[in-house]
């Protein structure tokens, strides 16, 4: 029966929708043009990094997935593990995946028929006035309705493709949250190490200056010195001591930041972070590969590309809204005087129908929607281009930062070692009466300043490695909850 109906529909489709089909094929050129523009942009990605120190070996994606292990710091590993499991942003991103998966299921359900059923019973009471007799009877009615909009030109399939791409983009967004979170935890942890190392240096400097102050006071009491030297010594010691509250506040705030990142209260993390931490070991260099490999690895770039695929499918679906739609419907009704009569075929009434409809006049709604979807696709392409440019820039910046910060650290280490020796010599000469107090105080200030700069630069070197791992797209993996759906 349906073969006959299809034969009758084909002339309608051929004659009545030829112009619409031509318009549809013309409109498809927008998608092709934008897709071609994306391909041309991908072709312009450089074949290698500007930094000569960058390795062209294949990108080590396995090492990137848990790059923090390369620092050899168990506390850092523990903090990142906690953050990836408990951080609110992680849980929110997982919820977004579940939403996208459910929306994809909704789109898929549109490809299938819908069934609805209802049943009713009506009591009828009649009374014969002549015989004064009453009768009661019950009529039972039931029916099953079926409706199916045939995806004649694949419009619904395009919506399903868009939902697939949006689900993939939501998963990529979750991976990007993992990448950013791991890097943020590591950067915050390195800041904590830097503040605590600087606090220890300042406390040592204060102790040294107090020794100098004690000597000045003894000399003044013995008549070999004057009050000027004593006051200068006091000023120097207090100047160094004044840095301690600020560093302690920075340490407290950084610890609290780590607590937020790991999804814990500040009090619950304090005990774990009380002890002074040395800097993590400097990681070995990692093969960074070529730019094209980085673009395939970075979740934000992948999400932007999936957004383009979703927008393309939405545009195609909007264009196919101009074409006719075929709806098949059917109904099976049951009418009986008793429940047992429902099984009697003579009471079954069936009805099948097919309808073909096409938009004729809708005040330009479809064409305007097509324009909207075309612009959304253009915006998706622009966001993709920005994601690619940003990723390339971030890798170049990180590679350069590692090189330059290492040079700076080497210089500061030499300067700090020389300043330490100069301060020790000045102290010895002052105690021997061969140098004045100002020379000692100046040497102590120089030593403290260079030590703090060295510690800060050391943290920057380590953080440059963190930023490199992040810019290469490292730090994401597929947890069981995502893989199982």
Image (cartoon, rainbow, N blue to C red):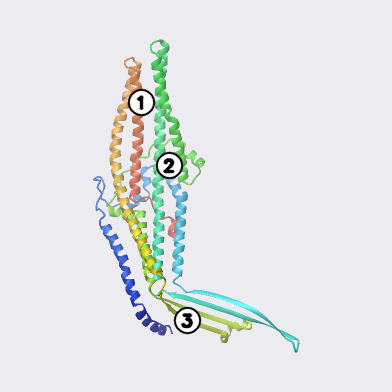
In depth, the one of 480 and 250 nearer the eye is 250
Residue in view at x 52 percent, y 83 percent: 350
Q: Position of residue 159 (x, y in %)?
A: 40, 67
Q: Residues within 10 Å of mark 1 (few under 14, many from 20)?
A: some
Residue in view at x 63 percent, y 78 percent: 121
Residue in view at x 44 percent, y 39 percent: 254
Considering only vertical position in the picture, is 365 above or below 459? below
On the rendered structure, is 266 left or right of 277?
right
Q: Residue under label 3, please give it.
A: 353
On the rendered structure, is 129 left or right of 229?
right
Question: Nearer the N terminus, badge 3 or badge 1?
Answer: 3
Q: CA distance from mark 3 to mark 1?
A: 94 Å
> Which is more foreground, mark 3 or mark 2?
3
Q: CA distance from mark 3 to mark 2?
A: 69 Å
Q: Position of residue 338 (x, y in %)?
A: 64, 82
Q: Is residue 215 visible?
A: no
Tag of residue 75: 2
Q: Position of residue 261 (x, y in %)?
A: 45, 45
Considering only vertical position in the picture, is 119 above or below 280? below
Circle 1 sits in a helix, a strand or a loop, which is it? helix
Question: Nearer the N terminus, badge 2 or badge 1?
Answer: 2
Q: Position of residue 110 (x, y in %)?
A: 45, 70
Q: Quadrant of residue 343?
A: bottom right
Circle 3 sits in a helix, a strand or a loop, which is it? strand
Q: Residues within 10 Å of mark 2 (few under 14, many from 20)?
A: some
Q: Residues within 10 Å of mark 3 (few under 14, many from 20)?
A: few
> Which is more foreground, mark 2 or mark 1?
1
Q: Is residue 144 visible?
A: yes
Marks 2 and 1 in Cβ contact (< 8 Å): no
Q: Quadrant of the N terminus?
A: bottom left
Q: Residue under label 1, please give it.
A: 445
Q: Residue furthest front?
A: 363
């Amino acid at each position: 029966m349906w073969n006959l109906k299809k034969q009758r529909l084909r002339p309608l489709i051929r004659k009545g929708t030829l112009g619409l089909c031509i318009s549809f094929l013309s409109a498809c050129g927008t998608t092709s043009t934008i897709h071609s523009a994306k391909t041309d942009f991908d072709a312009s990605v450089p074949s290698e990094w500007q930094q000569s120190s960058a390795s062209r070996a294949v990108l080590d994606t396995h090492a990137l997935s848990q790059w923090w292990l390369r620092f050899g710091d168990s506390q850092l590993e523990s903090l990142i593990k906690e953050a990836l499991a408990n951080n609110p942003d992680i849980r929110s991103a997982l919820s977004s995946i579940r939403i996208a998966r459910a929306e994809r299921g909704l789109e898929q359900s549109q490809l299938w028929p819908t069934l609805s059923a209802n049943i009713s019973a009506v009591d009828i009471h009649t009374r014969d006035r002549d015989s004064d007799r009453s009768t009661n009877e019950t009529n039972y009615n039931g029916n099953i309705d079926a409706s199916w909009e045939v995806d004649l030109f694949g419009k619904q399939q395009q919506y399903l493709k868009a939902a697939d791409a949006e689900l993939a983009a939501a998963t990529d967004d979750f991976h990007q949250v993992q990448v950013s979170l791991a890097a943020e935890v590591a950067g915050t942890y390195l800041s904590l190490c830097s503040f605590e190392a600087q606090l220890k240096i300042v406390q040592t400097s204060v102790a040294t200056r107090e020794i100098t102050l004690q000597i000045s006071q003894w000399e003044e009491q013995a008549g070999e010195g004057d009050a000027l030297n004593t006051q200068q010594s006091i000023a120097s010691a207090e100047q160094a001591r004044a840095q301690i509250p600020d560093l302690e506040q920075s340490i407290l705030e950084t610890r609290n930041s780590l607590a937020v990142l790991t999804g814990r209260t500040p009090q619950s993390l304090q005990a774990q972070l009380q002890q002074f931490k040395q800097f993590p070991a400097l990681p070995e260099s990692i093969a960074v590969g070529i730019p094209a490999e980085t673009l395939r690895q970075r979740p934000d770039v992948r999400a932007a590309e999936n957004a383009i695929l979703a927008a393309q499918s939405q545009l195609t679906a909007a264009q196919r809204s101009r074409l006719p739609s075929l709806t098949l419907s059917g109904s099976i009704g049951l009418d009986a005087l008793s429940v047992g009569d429902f099984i009697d075929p003579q009471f079954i009434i069936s009805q099948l129908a097919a309808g073909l409809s096409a938009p004729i006049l809708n005040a330009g709604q479809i064409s305007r929607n097509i324009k909207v979807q075309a612009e959304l696709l253009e915006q998706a392409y622009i966001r993709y281009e920005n994601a690619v440019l940003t990723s390339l820039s971030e890798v170049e910046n990180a590679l350069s930062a590692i090189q330059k910060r290492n040079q700076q650290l080497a210089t500061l280490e030499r300067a700090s070692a020389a300043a330490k020796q100069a301060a020790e010599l000045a102290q010895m000469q002052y105690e021997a009466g061969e140098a004045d107090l100002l020379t000692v105080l100046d040497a102590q200030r120089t030593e403290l300043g260079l030590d703090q700069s060295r510690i800060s630069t050391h943290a920057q070197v380590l953080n440059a490695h963190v930023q490199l791992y992040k810019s290469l797209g490292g730090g994401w993996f597929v947890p069981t909850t995502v893989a199982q759906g």
